[in-house]
Amino acid sequence: SQKIEQNSEALNIQEGKTATLTCNYTNYSPAYLQWYRQDPGRGPVFLLLIRENEKEKRKERLKVTFDTTLKQSLFHITASQPADSATYLCATLGGATNKLIFGTGTLLAVQP
Amino acid sequence: NAGVTQTPKFRILKIGQSMTLQCAQDMNHNYMYWYRQDPGMGLKLIYYSVGAGITDKGEVPNGYNVSRSTTEDFPLRLELAAPSQTSVYFCASSIQGTGELFFGEGSRLTVL
């Protein structure tokens, strides 16, 4: 069944740099991928959705790409700020119920 | 709008006790979900509902029950609490089954 894999190691970057997070899926190309942000002790908050036929999606300083050949989505935050520090989750439809399944998330720490 | 509201935020249970986690949404969403989140394991779907009176099992339903008597409410019942049910529980809702999820702030449950 479909699985979502994210780098479990924290990503540490300097303020102002571009952060790039990776999400890989294991099986069939999903119809779309979603990205969420989760702060400590809070529920995930939806950020972006990219469909299979979209190579790239942007929202302010955020950019998401979808590469069906590599079975991968990249999530970029340009001009990163300490306030961007959080865990970022990738999600898509999958599992036995074909409902939203999530990766384990990648912790981003932006140093001032 | 309050969005998705979960209660309680924190609870400690003894093994074998029962309790209900409450979830309410005021967005008139048909779809509602219960996830649990364990460290390093990501979000796992417990149960979901596509509308009042309709519920179905997710990936990890054992030890839990749900009901959906109204569009707004989707309580999660733990009948005989076990230490393996120590987790953070998130309720979520969506307009349709393939759209973004709106999450509550979570309920942290500890079973001792």
Image (cartoon, coloured by chain):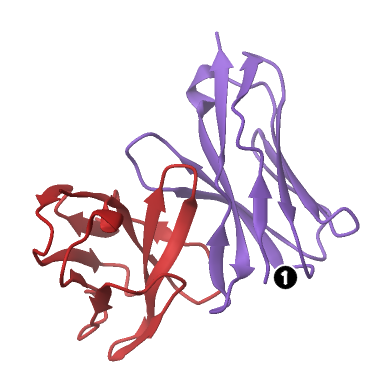
Chain colours: A purple, B red
Residue B34: x and y in percent read: 35, 66
Q: Nearer the viewer, residue A5 or B15?
A: B15
B6 to the left or right of A2 = left
Total labels drawn? 1
B6 to the left or right of B51 = left
* Quarter containing the N terminus of chain B: bottom left
For image coordinates 62% across by 63% down, the residue present is A92
A79 to the left or right of B20 = right
Residue B95: x and y in percent read: 45, 73
For image coordinates 25% across by 78% down, the residue present is B66
Chain ID at mark 1:
A
Residue B72: x and y in percent read: 24, 75
**Most extreme residue toward the bottom, as rendered?**
B53
Residue B20: x and y in percent read: 14, 67
Name which residue type carries label 1: Ala
Q: Secondary structure at mark 1?
A: loop
Residue B64 vs A63, above or below: the answer is: below
**Most extreme residue toward the top, as rendered?**
A112
Name the residue beneath numbered marker 1: A31
Q: Nearer the viewer, residue B101 or B83?
A: B83
Do we see residue A68 in this rendering? yes
Which quadrant of the figure has residue B25?
bottom left
For image coordinates 73% across by 68% down, the residue present is A30
Which quadrant of the figure has residue A93?
bottom right
